[in-house]
Image (spheres, helix red, strand yellow):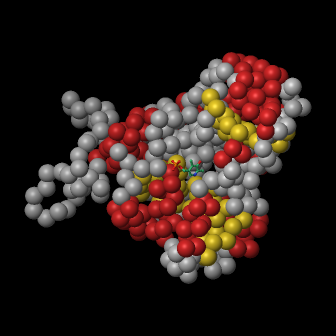
Amino acid sequence: MSTTGDGTRSVRAGLPTPEQYEPTLPGPVFAAHFHLSGDPVGPYTYGRDGNPTWTHLERAISELEAPDEPVGTTVFASGMAAVSAVLLSQVRTGDVVVLPDDGYQALPLVREQLEAYGVEVRTAPTGTDSVLGLLDGAKLLWIETPSNPGLDVCDVRGLVEAAHRAGALVAVDNTLATPLGQRPLELGADFSVASDTKGLTGHGDILLGHVSCGDPGLTDEVRRWRKIVGAIPGPMEAWLAHRSLATLHLRMDRQCANALALAETLAERSDVAGLRYPGLPGDPSYATAARQMRRFGSVVSFRLADKATAERFLAELRLVDDATSFGGVRSTAERRGRWGGDAVPEGFIRFSVGAEDLDDLLADVEHALDASAR
Ligand SMILES: *Cc1c(COP(=O)(O)O)cnc(C)c1O
């Protein structure tokens, strides 16, 4: 597998050994329970514990996350189910956890919950060295890179080395990059976690998440947590996700190229400030991103003059939906400040670049910028 390219790996990921008269990718298996006589041993006994459709998807994601190493993947009903499974299966009362203070907007809720369980939570911004001073006595370091929505990048390998020296496990939220953009387990992380609601599935029609780890003991703990909480994906969602993987490389290549071109166009405009794209040479994240990322993602962020200008811009767009989430084949953009959870200015736009024809997309954005700059 390791000698194949990303495209070959994406189209074949997780497929079972060919069998005469069987489909290439077996359809979703709808089952609450499976025929089972005698001792209740797997692989499939009860639907909360395992399902063949998950198994195919989990193998596929493992191949993408770490083509050269045996890793275990556990799929979940959503990204937050995956995030919670790592944190809550690992930490105990009295432990210390280090979280980013500029990460996904539900992390502050996670922080509150951890603190309610008697876990000490320390926070630091992504992409700064201040996290190094917080690792003493920590059980787990949580990294989100590139961060959502600020698009800051941190040096995963460097942080993993420091955290491991301090005896802490490291989890990387890899949602924005996808495994075709960056492979955290190869950079030394203990867990690669993602919301597959975003770029991995890429059509904006399902919620899903996963956790991959190289250590079978950690995988068992994550699976045990899924069994306890029951945050399991539906077979239809799991199957749709697997089907979507076959085009992951095509979508990523197109969307990342479009994102870079959009960033280059925005960089020329005087009405756009605070432009961020990790793949833009000159971006504060570029040097670190270029060392550890293989694709820079489909999200671009920037700032317009104020809330009213940002709202006019969004209303003028014709090919870009005003909607949250990111990573889909259809471009979306939103004024991130409307949620109130992120520390961003009122005119801050998070733009998720889709797979449209570049000229159409650029023309639409330039028109909307011109029309909103009244
Ligand atoms: C969306 C997102 C999540 C949460 O995923 P859901 O699938 O919405 O539960 C977690 N982390 C990041 C970085 C995200 O963008």
The quadrant holding residue 156 is bottom right
The quadrant holding residue 358 is top right
At 74% from the left edge and 74% from the top edge, which residue is drawn? 133
> Is residue 256 something one can see in this rendering?
no
Residue 364 location (% of width, % of height) = 72, 21
At 46% from the left edge and 56% from the top edge, which residue is drawn? 81
Residue 118 location (% of width, % of height) = 55, 78
At 61% from the left edge and 39% from the top edge, which residue is drawn? 324
Residue at the left extreme, as displayed = 38
> Is residue 109 something one can see in this rendering?
yes
Residue 79 location (% of width, % of height) = 50, 51
At 68% from the left edge and 29% from the top edge, which residue is drawn? 258
From the viewer's side, name the closer residue of 121 and 145. 121
Q: State how many labels appear.
A: 0
Residue 349 location (% of width, % of height) = 73, 39
Quadrant of the snapshot with the N terminus: top left
From the viewer's side, name the closer residue of 117 and 312. 312
From the viewer's side, name the closer residue of 310 and 52. 310
Give above or below for 179 relative to 260.
below
From the viewer's side, name the closer residue of 137 and 17. 137
Image side of residue 234 versus residue 287, left or right: left
